[in-house]
Image: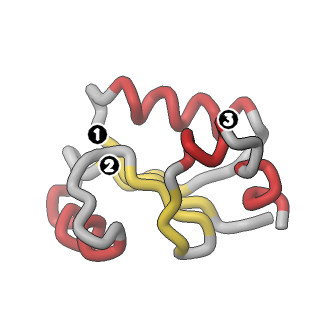
Amino acid sequence: MNKVEIYTKGHCPYCHRAKALLTEKGVAFEEFKIDVQPELRASMIERANGGSTVPQIFINNQHIDMFALESQNKLDSLLTV
């Protein structure tokens, strides 16, 4: 299974939705809570090529737009490669 990482904040509805989708698909993920560990924010922004909002999601260190991929029916193939 692929390595899935997600940067989140506790009160972010998009983050909750992203985690719910991954959980629904049975995908294990590593979560980085930048509101709890603000020192991770700079690393997130760098990895996301300047993206500063959450969630920021990575599959095997590749930054993705999970909801766009899901709407195009392309997410499952990335998750199971």
Which mark sits nearer the N-terminus, 3 or 1? 1
Quadrant of the image containing the C terminus: bottom right
Q: Earlier in the sequence, mark 2 or mark 3?
A: 3
Q: Residue at x 29, y 66 (%)?
A: 44
| Number of disc labels | 3
Q: CA distance from mark 1 to mark 2?
A: 5 Å
Image location (x, y in percent) of residue 69: 63, 48
69, above or below 39, in the image: above
First in residue order: circle 1 vs circle 2: 1
The residue that disc 1 covers is 9
Give above or below for 36 relative to 13.
below
Q: CA distance from mark 3 to mark 1?
A: 17 Å
* Amino acid tagged 3: Thr
- From mark 2 to mark 3, how far is it between C-alphas? 17 Å
> Which residue matches tag 3?
23
| Side (left or right) of 26 relative to 59 | right
Q: Say which amino acid is labelled 2.
A: Lys
Residue 78 in percent (x, y) is at 74, 60
Estimate how packed mark 1 is, as few (under 14), some (14 to 19) or many (20 or more) residues with alpha carbons within 10 Å: many
Q: Residues within 10 Å of mark 3 (few under 14, many from 20)?
A: few
Asked which secondary structure carries label 2, the reply is: strand
Where residue 56 appears, as percent x and y from the top left, is 39, 54
Q: From the viewer's perspective, is 1 left or right of 16?
A: right
Check disc 1 and report its element: helix, strand or loop: loop
Q: Secondary structure at mark 3?
A: helix
Q: Which mark is residue 33?
A: 2
Tell me which amino acid carries mark 1: Lys
- Residue placed most toward the observer, 69 or 28: 69
Of 39 and 21, the residue lying toward us: 21
Give the left or right position of residue 19, taking residue 38 as reference.
right
